[in-house]
Amino acid sequence: MRREPDMKPEPTSDEDLLRAFAGGRKAALAELARRYERPLLGFANGLLAGRNDRVACDVVQETWLRVICYADSFDGRSGFKTWLYRIAINQCKSVWAARPQPVSSEAAIAQADSAAGPERMVQDAELAAHVRLAVAQLPPEQRLVVLLCYHNGMTHAQAAEILEIPLGTLKSRLHAALRDLRERLSAETKP
Amino acid sequence: MTAEHDEQLEQALTKLTTWHGPVPHLWRRALGAAKTKRARASARLQWLLRQPLSAGIAASIIVIALGATIAINLPHLRMKYDHSQAARRRAPAASDLRGVEAVGKRVVEGRVITRVPEIRNELESLGYVGLAECRRQRIPRIRARHDGVPIRRLGGDPTLCHRRSRPVRVGRRSG
């Protein structure tokens, strides 16, 4: 059966969508945003712990702006997801550099309380606040690794590709970060 | 910490990078910002082009660009030139021994390059002698045979070294 020209299948891969956007289709960017905007916001929010949600929004908006501006120059050497997260991480690093803001435990707990819904248990909220605080106190490389590895079903291989480090390095950093977190949390939760 | 604590930690870490609020569609704002950025850049360029000094600035830019290009390429060109000169110095006969015929023509016309030993040897093997030798021994300058045929018969005149005449192509047999 002959297929009509307007019945062409929609491009499904991220890279196809980006190419379609570079070719002038705004709907392709909308589809990419539908796939990635929420995870990106969560990741940026986790990475910029202790700051206002607005900062995370700014970072994600700036990330999209860069995607729009440089869609033509995307060479496909890495996947779109890798490229997107690299941009977001660089934006977060810029924020770290421009506005270094140590997280206080009160601010972290207040943020956790504001995020907690009525269904969430207080204990969970407290633990989340402590974890947020402990993560924010990690060295930047370990913080990036631990957040990326526990983000939205990201595999270790994907995280290593995004961070441009060998898989072994990623695993050793993750191990060190988790050990550090456990120590901090056990010290904090001790009476 | 226990395994239960580890699980709680992992859950907390996962929740740490999860967005709970509504999605603000930041890509739309980014699209608008990109459009504004482009429009601003275009307006700036147009403003620049409208300026009376823009022609002068453009000319200066071109001159600077040309100068930079030459400055960048000059060492490369110089190196190429030096290499070619060195090659010529190393192999002087290479350009002059392109063919015995051409050399022979020059010999017959009395313009022998006798300072180049390779040419001299080549010519002597063909039976040519230098002008000084010619005068000293009182012999015709072209005395030997070429390919078994006397040069004289080839249409050449053995006294050509003294008297300029129609040049003879050595090695070409006439009818």
Image: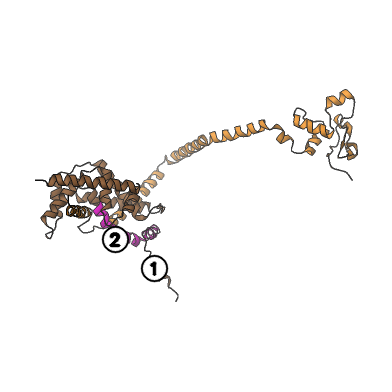
Q: Residue at x 37, y 55 (%)?
A: A79
Q: State whether the magenta stretch is mostly helix, strand or loop.
A: helix
Residue to which mark 2 is pinned: A34
**Residue B7 coordinates in the image, percent (x, y):** 20, 55
Front-most of B40 and B150?
Answer: B150
Q: Quadrant of residue A8?
A: bottom left
Identify residue type, mark 1.
Pro
Colour chain A is painted in: brown
Q: Colour of chain B?
A: orange
Q: Is residue B127 left or right of residue B39?
A: right
Secondary structure type for disc 1:
loop
The x, y position of residue A56, in whole percent, is 23, 50
Q: Which residue matches tag 1?
A: A9
Sequence-earlier tag: 2 or 1: 1
Task: Name the chain letter of the residue that bears numbered label 1.
Answer: A
Q: Amino acid at mark 2?
A: Arg
| Chain designation of label 2 | A
- Residue B51 belongs to magenta span: no
Depth check, front residue: B111 or A11:
A11
Residue at the far top in the pictured view: B136
Residue in view at x 82 percent, y 33 percent: B125
Left or right of A52, for residue A77: right
Magenta segment boundaries in residue numbering: A14-43
Mark 2 touches mark 1? (CB < 8 Å)? no
Q: Note whether A15 is above or below A132 in the view shown.
A: below
Query: Is residue A7 rendered to the left or right of residue A59?
Result: right
Q: Residues within 10 Å of mark 2 (few under 14, many from 20)?
A: some
